[in-house]
Amino acid sequence: DDGTITPRQDPKVRAKIITDKFTMENDDLTCWNPTDARKIWCFGPDQQGPNCVVDVSKGVQYLNEIKDSVVAGFQWAANEGVLCEENMRGVRINIQRRGIAR
């Protein structure tokens, strides 16, 4: 929210900031590793904000083919809210290893 981390930053610089800030805590839910921090697909709502989608998968084929659809759906959900039309705050969505049907 304070503009320290932006979507336009170099992924390596952004990863350094995120890992420095969020690896000191012992809570597994808020801990970031450098690999995950470099693989942020987007922030939301409105391409900025406290929510993000992170690709934590390893070696999944064709994942980039659905990236635009995932980002668009995430932007809509982050802006409109999941249940009560309220913006999401502080949500990290991980894209896990799953096969994509062809």
Image (tube, rainbow, N blue to C red):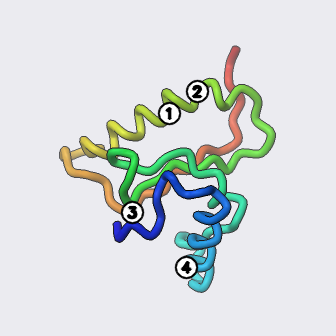
Whole-angstrom CA distance, mark 3 to mark 1, is 18 Å
Q: What percent of the width, then of the height, locates residue 39?
A: 64, 51
Residue ID for mark 4: 21
Marks 2 and 4: in contact by CB < 8 Å?
A: no
- What amino acid does circle 3 point to? Gly
Q: Residue at x 41, y 40 (%)?
A: 74
Q: Single out the residue that lies furthest toward the top.
A: 102
Q: What percent of the width, then of the height, locates residue 24?
A: 60, 85
- What amino acid does circle 1 point to? Val
Marks 3 and 4: in contact by CB < 8 Å?
A: no
Q: What percent of the width, then of the height, locates residue 22?
A: 56, 76
Whole-angstrom CA distance, mark 4 to mark 2, is 30 Å
Circle on res. 49: none
Left or right relative to 71: residue 98: right
Circle on res. 90: 3
Q: Which of 30 and 15 is in front in this view?
A: 15
Marks 2 and 1: in contact by CB < 8 Å?
A: yes
Give the class, few, some or many, for how many residues have Cα within 10 Å of label 4's Cα (few <14, many ≥20): few
- What amino acid does circle 2 point to? Ile
Sequence-wise, which precedes: disc 3 or disc 1? Answer: 1
Q: Is residue 52 above or below residue 30?
A: above
Residue ID for mark 1: 70
Residue ID for mark 2: 66
